[in-house]
Image (cartoon, grey):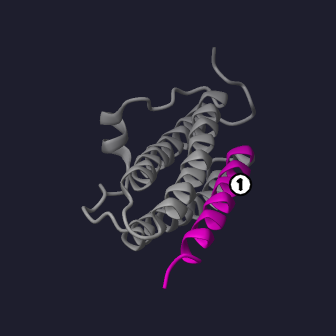
Amino acid sequence: MKAEIGVTGLNLKAVANELNVILADEYVLYTKTKNAHWNVEGPDFFEKHTFFEGQFTQLDDIIDKVAERIRTIGHYAAGSLKLYLELTQLTESGDKNDSQGFIKELLMDHETIIIRCRENIHRFAEEYKDAGSSDFVTGIMEVHEKMAWFLRAHLD
């Protein structure tokens, strides 16, 4: 059944398409963070193993919320690895398994998502007349800002 929430169908489709890009980015970042959790090596192994676990747990929650937002506005959430790789703006992980390398790469990915969310705040509210999705991506952006801060705090 079509969502009748005071936003045109075309605008909801545009918002859903953009949210699916964010969903793909979130899923790729989640996978990269899991990789860091599983494969980090070095004298700080246990500390970073635990740290990355906290981060991927937060990302799992974000993924679910983004997919549910897409469904809330009447569209289907992307749900395949093939589609995520087509939609994402992020790249695959490098091949170094040290904590500093993982942290730098994950930080860049969080910052990429922050910028994309920030670009969509005004666009969702003004261009697409969807204040709810604008507010939603503001909240997602704020979570990524905090996660990025935590990553930044681990850098030399």
Dominant secondary structure (helix, strand or loop) of the stretch shown in magenta: helix
In the image, what residue occupies the spot 63% across and 19% down? Answer: 2
Q: Is 64 located above or below residue 74 in the figure? A: below
**Classed neighbour count for the residue bearing mark 1: other residues with Cα under 10 Å, few (<14), some (14–19), many (≥20):** some
Callout 1: SS: helix
Residue 52 screen position, x and y as percent: 52, 56
Closer to the camera in the image, 4 or 51:
51
Q: Is residue 32 above or below residue 80?
A: below
Residue 124 is inside the magenta segment? no
In the shown orientation, is residue 85 left or right of residue 137? left
Q: In which image quadrant can residue 98 be found?
A: bottom left
Q: Nearer the viewer, residue 60 or 25?
A: 60
Label 1 sits on what residue type?
A: Gly
Going by the picture, which residue comes out furthest to the bottom? 156
Q: Over which residues does the magenta segment extend?
A: 132-156
In the rendered image of this protein, does residue 117 appear above or below residue 68? below
Where residue 77 sits in the image (x, y, percent)?
50, 30
Q: Quadrant of the N terminus?
A: top right
Picture residue at 59% right of the left edge, 45% below the top: 57
On the image, the x and y values in percent for residue 150 come to 61, 69
73 left or right of 13 in image: right
Residue most extreme to the front: 43
Residue indicated by mark 1: 139
**Residue lying at 36% horizontally and 63% vertically, measured from the top left:** 41
Q: Position of residue 84 (x, y in %)?
A: 37, 40
